[in-house]
Amino acid sequence: MRLLARVVLIIGVALLPVLAMQTFNATALRGARQADVRDEALREAQALATEIRWITAGVRNTLIALATNPVIRSGDPTACTATLRALRASLPSLRAISLLGEDDVVRCSSDTFAEGHVRADAPEVGLARARGNAALGGYSRDKPDGPGELPLAYPVRGLPGAGPVLVADIDLTWLAGQLARRRLAPDSLLWLADRDGIVLVNLPGPSIAGQPLPPSDRGALDAAGPSVVERRGPDGLLREIGFVPPGAAMPDVFTAIGLSTERAFAATDAAAARGYALIFAGLLAALALALFTGRNIIARPVRAILDTTERWRHGDTGARVPTRGGRSEFARIARAVNDMLDAAEAGQARLKERLAELNAIYDASPVGLGFLDRSMRYVTVNTRLAEINNHTEAEHRGHAVREILSTTAADRIEPLLERALAGEPIPPHEVETIAPAGARR
């Protein structure tokens, strides 16, 4: 691996702890934000339950006041109807107020359509008589194509027999308008349902009042108390849903608020993305700085040293590493390399001088001298040996002893050479041969 690549790798490894800390912080912040969203969803659901309790409490107080009215207690249909109509005109939250007799037949009502009808199947009427107090019913309609209502019944006490019951039908359209004034966060959902899980109000979007809650949410009706669940809605958004089951805050009403986690996490995710972007930008800046520094401070001095040694390897003994002074490690290395090269060059000069002297002695020697390789072939001979053997120096080079000398001389010399090549010390020997001109050698 090249030195510059190692520097870049070191920078990348050094940034790993920073990346790990950013990931840990982003995860911790997201977890904390999720806990905040869950708490907020539960608070909103409980606040919604409180608001419904106050609305129904206002209707209940109206019925309590009516139950003490002499006109209502007298049972006079004409006077009762006039009284109920006048009161209904001042209460836009109610669709109708009716007085039921002991037989559950409507004796008088602010709605003419309701007079004479039987409401025996209304569970809130029986509950009101049994409790002796107000009872809230479930989703209902006074007409098949009419708007939805939420009835609240209250017994008229102190009269003989089972006694009449006052019923006020809360207008769900009005209730939806009231709840729409709440400042819900974007992509939030609101539900109201009766004790049977029938939707009373849903916000925002098209009304699904009168339809049952989705099967995944019906289990919340039987919860022991307020809680929070995570659900993905029909629109595909994931939400933290805080809910208050029937009986926890207001009997027979289910309230729920769903807050979008994606919307809640938007700021946290954006901050995390900015953090990762800054780390990435820092990584790019660090890499760019490392490349610049590596090339100019590390790679260039190293390359100069390598180039100088390469030139020396090819015979340029005058090559030196450029130095610009300074006290850096590379400047000190360059000076050390140059000192070493100076010493090597001086040594080579002395060696050449010594070799020149030896060659002069070798060539001028009155004794024939020569060098052979391990194959007993001549490598070099001096002038005197060339004369003795009656062959030029070039004719000796690369030829075997037997090719230059006579057979008789070669037979005597070759065994001695083999013993010498084997490392055996050989005492002086004389071999006499006859030159072509007849002279002895």
Image (cartoon, rainbow, N blue to C red):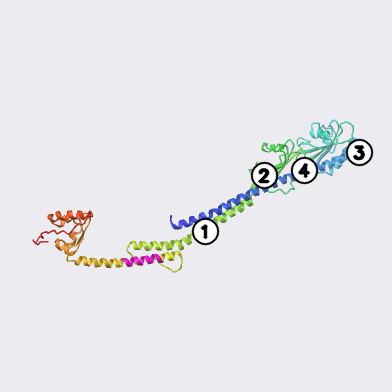
Q: Residue at x 88, y 31 (%)?
A: 161
Mark 2 or mark 4, whichever is nearer to me: 2
Using a 10 Å C-alpha cutoff, classify the residue at mark 4 as few (fewer than 14 neighbours), some (14 to 19) or many (20 or more): many
**Residue at which label 3 appears:** 70
**Residue at which label 4 appears:** 52
**Is residue 263 something one can see in this rendering?**
no
Mark 1 or mark 3, whichever is nearer to me: 1
The amino acid on which the numbered mark 1 sits, given as a three-letter code, is Ala
Please report the bounds of the magenta region as a residue range.
Answer: 335-347
Is residue 342 within the magenta segment?
yes
**Residue at which label 2 appears:** 240
Quarter of the image for residue 250 reads top right
Contact (Cβ within 8 Å) of mark 1 with mark 4: no
Using a 10 Å C-alpha cutoff, classify the residue at mark 1 as few (fewer than 14 neighbours), some (14 to 19) or many (20 or more): some
Residue 81 badge? none
**Is residue 394 something one can see in this rendering?**
yes
Which element carries disc 1, helix, strand or loop? helix
**Residue at which label 1 appears:** 286
Mark 3 or mark 4, whichever is nearer to me: 4
The amino acid on which the numbered mark 2 sits, given as a three-letter code, is Glu
Q: Nearer the viewer, residue 422 or 245?
A: 422
